[in-house]
């Protein structure tokens, strides 16, 4: 009860800040007005309609068609250095932690049922077609041709699923992704191919639409080379019911596809910086261009939205309506995650110039997708003020769009003529993984990256992720939040520090309250770990703010006391450091090479270098915490390795972020990372 007056006072401060947010934050109102007037959800959607017609797998002809379209548009919009960069990909070359994956393409694929009619086997029903629906052929399928019976193996990832079943030379029906069973079904039991009805990620809408066909994958580097077709849950149920009745289902499968040495094609363009002292620094807008057709929200939406940001900024600068940015603004269109790892490793000069990134992955979902729009923060290992800057612009759009939806009037409604009129209701969300932002924020580069994304999405990774589900108003709003954030960061100098500081301090109060409420459910050392982490993160944000404009010319003591005072009403004074003993006192530092996160795309560096059997004995990657998966723990443990933190301090930091975890799991993982040459112990 003694904290109630303080809490009420803090709420008053936060509410006062929100009231002020009716005015545009950080940017001059004339700039905000120019962006609102010029950004076009319709222009973005026209580009999306072209891109979503391409089946954009890495190294494929359709991917290159999409990349060329993007770059051609960028040139037409007046951007500089618009080009498609090419990097060899043959399955052997490494770019940091990414083993290059050969390009994959397909020419033809059909799956027919054949039945004996009047003594002749004849095609009767076609269940999959590359020409009609390329998503029905699993990515990384190899060529093959077979007419064989279909056998239901359930999940198909355990020996028990094959007991009493002869699958050699036949096609197997599975509920899992093809890549999850290929080694067993094809490699061990000799199946000729796979038919999968794997469903989407589990959300409230999981399995609701039985007609959806999900995107399927085989493993690029699997020794069990095969092909796989994807069918709907409805079709699979019919198959299973017929097989259960003892019917024979004979299928004819023909596939002409495969991997071959190719290139990673990465589109890029810039708006050059104007300040002689700052133009060598860059703000990056990123997305990922690859995805099966149609792949409209995931992720044609992010790619065309940053293209629309590029068009708008270039046009407004050319017309003199806004000044050119002081720092260079770069736009990048790579294959997801692996392309970003490739670019940052292959072009270290570009990586060294990047100060911050705005990443868009799924930003256009209309009401039918059930999407919630998120402005996602970075991990606790990388505190930065940029997330509060992005949140300020998102909250401004929230307020203006709600006012317009509720009253029909707003100064800045951010509504596209062909789009909806619903309020945005963007959420500021804690760190989550799953896209290129995690590459930028990996400890190899430590580039803070705002992640704008829809989640959930009812139709992600299915044939119904189409342009019809994309809302031009949503595209325009995402474009504004991204454009305003990136353009502000490109121009920010010491003159804007106080304004940003106010926004960060308001965010500090909100986060401190959340930490206070969370701490009330913890006891002893776990509560102390949470408080230490909160102080470290908020101090780190202020430090990042001053470092952004002053470089290394900052004394940490200048900001420590003031920031601590703002946290004390909720959390009290920072607890003393933890008492160290045994393995908890170990200290490691990351080696300069290889650069990149260890679990990338289509390849796992940790598993490859450690060996699958040993990797499976490491407990941390599969640990399920209160607020994070094992992959998130593994990512952050490596990020916190800095040559100063002890293993105990790293354990406490990730525990504060994702939930308690045994120290032994963290130490075990650190020792494994040392064994494969990613980190080394710092001897005292």
Image (spheres, helix red, strand yellow):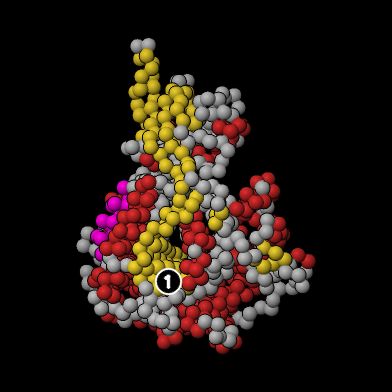
Residue 18: percent from left, percent from top: 38, 78
Residue highlighted by disc 1: 283
- Vertical arrangement, residue 323 with respect to residue 523, above or below: below
Query: Is residue 246 toward the left or the right of residue 380 in the image?
Result: left
Tell which of 123 and 150 is nearer to you. 123
Residue at the spot 51% in from the left edge and 25% down from the top edge: 170
Quadrant of the image containing the N terminus? bottom right
Residue that appears at 46% across and 47% down: 262
Mainly helix, strand or loop, the magenta region?
helix
Residue 39, x across and y down, in percent: 27, 67
| Tally of numbered tags | 1
* Front residue of 19 and 271: 271
Q: Residue furthest right?
A: 582
Query: Can residue 264 be seen?
Result: yes
The percent position of residue 317, horizontal first and vertical second, equals 28, 75
Residue 24, picture quadrant: bottom left
Q: Residue at x 34, y 68 (%)?
A: 80
Q: Residues within 10 Å of mark 1 (few under 14, many from 20)?
A: many
Q: Could you say which is closer to the camera, residue 125 or residue 12?
A: 125
Residue 435, compared with residue 146, is above or below; it is: below
- Does residue 234 sit above or below 632 in this rendering? above
Identify which residue is drawn at 22% across, 69% down. Answer: 408
Residue range highlighted in magenta: 40-53
Secondary structure of the residue carrying numbered label 1: strand
- Indicate the position of residue 343 as horizontal and vertical percent values: 48, 60
Is residue 18 visible to us here? no
- The C terminus lies in which quarter of the figure? bottom right
Which image quadrant for residue 679? bottom right
Q: Is residue 678 left or right of residue 509?
A: right
For residue 6, side relative to residue 301 (left or right): right
Where residue 138 sits, quadrant-wise, is top left
Question: With respect to residue 205, does 119 lie above or below?
Answer: above
């Amino acid at each position: 009860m003694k904290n109630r007056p303080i809490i009420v006072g803090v709420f008053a401060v936060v509410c006062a800040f929100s009231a002020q947010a009716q005015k545009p934050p950080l940017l001059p109102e004339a700039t905000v007005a120019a962006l609102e007037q010029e950004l076009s959800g319709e222009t973005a959607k026209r580009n999306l309609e072209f891109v979503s017609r391409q089946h954009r797998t890495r190294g494929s002809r359709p991917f290159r068609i999409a990349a060329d379209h993007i770059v051609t548009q960028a040139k037409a919009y007046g951007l500089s250095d618009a080009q498609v960069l090419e990097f060899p990909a043959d399955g052997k070359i490494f770019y940091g932690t990414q083993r290059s994956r050969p390009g994959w393409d397909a020419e033809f694929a059909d799956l027919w049922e054949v039945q004996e009619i009047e003594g002749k086997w004849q095609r009767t029903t076609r269940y999959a077609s590359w020409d009609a629906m390329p998503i029905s052929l699993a990515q990384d399928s190899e060529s093959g041709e077979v007419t064989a019976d279909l056998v239901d193996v359930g999940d198909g990832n355990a020996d028990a699923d094959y007991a009493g079943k002869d699958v050699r030379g036949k096609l197997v029906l599975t509920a899992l992704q093809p890549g999850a069973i290929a080694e067993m079904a094809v490699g061990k039991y000799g199946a000729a191919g796979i038919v999968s009805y794997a469903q989407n990620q589990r959300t409230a809408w999981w399995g609701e639409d039985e007609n959806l066909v999900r995107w399927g994958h085989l493993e690029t580097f699997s020794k069990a080379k095969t092909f796989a077709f994807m069918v709907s849950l409805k079709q699979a149920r019919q198959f299973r019911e017929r097989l259960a009745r003892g019917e024979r289902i004979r299928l004819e499968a023909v596939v002409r596809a495969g991997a071959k040495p190719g290139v990673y094609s990465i589109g890029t363009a810039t708006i050059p910086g104007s300040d002689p002292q700052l133009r060598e620094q860059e703000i990056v807008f990123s997305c990922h261009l690859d995805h099966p057709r149609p792949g409209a929200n995931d992720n044609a939406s992010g790619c065309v939205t940053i293209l629309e940001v590029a068009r708008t900024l270039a046009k407004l600068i050319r017309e003199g309506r806004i000044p050119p940015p002081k720092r260079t603004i770069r736009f990048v269109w790579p294959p997801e995650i692996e392309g970003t790892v490739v670019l940052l490793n292959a072009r270290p000069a570009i990586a060294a110039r990047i100060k911050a990134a705005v990443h868009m992955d799924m930003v256009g979902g209309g009401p039918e997708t059930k999407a919630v729009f998120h402005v996602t923060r970075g991990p606790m290992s990388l505190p930065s003020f940029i997330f509060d800057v992005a949140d300020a612009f998102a909250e401004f759009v929230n307020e203006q769009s709600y006012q317009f939806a509720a009253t029909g009037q707003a100064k800045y409604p951010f509504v596209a003529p062909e789009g909806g009129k619903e309020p945005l209701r963007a959420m500021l969300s804690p760190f989550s993984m799953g896209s290129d932002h995690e590459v930028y924020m990996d400890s190899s580069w430590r580039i803070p990256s705002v992640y704008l994304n829809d989640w959930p999405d009812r139709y992600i990774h299915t044939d119904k992720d189409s342009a019809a589900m994309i809302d031009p108003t949503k595209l325009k709003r995402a474009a504004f939040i991204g454009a305003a954030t990136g353009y502000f960061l490109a121009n920010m100098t010491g003159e804007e520090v106080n304004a940003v500081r106010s926004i960060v301090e308001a965010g500090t109060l909100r986060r401190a309250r959340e930490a206070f409420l969370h701490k009330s459910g913890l006891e002893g050392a776990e509560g102390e770990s949470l408080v230490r982490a909160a102080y470290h993160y908020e101090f780190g944000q202020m430090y990042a703010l001053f470092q952004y404009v002053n470089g290394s010319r900052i004394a940490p003591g200048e900001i420590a006391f003031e920031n601590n005072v703002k946290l004390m009403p909720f959390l009290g004074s920072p607890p003393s450091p933890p008492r160290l003993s045994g393995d908890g006192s170990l200290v490691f530092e990351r080696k300069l090479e290889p650069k990149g996160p260890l679990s990338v795309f289509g390849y796992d560096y940790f598993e490859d270098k450690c060996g699958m059997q040993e990797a499976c004995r490491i407990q941390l990657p599969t640990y399920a915490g209160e607020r994070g998966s094992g992959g998130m723990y593994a990512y952050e443990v490596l990020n916190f390795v800095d040559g100063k933190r002890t293993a105990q301090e790293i354990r406490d930091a990730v525990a504060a972020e994702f939930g308690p975890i045994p120290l032994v799991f963290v130490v075990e993982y650190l020792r494994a990372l040392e064994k494969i040459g990613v980190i080394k112990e710092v001897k005292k």
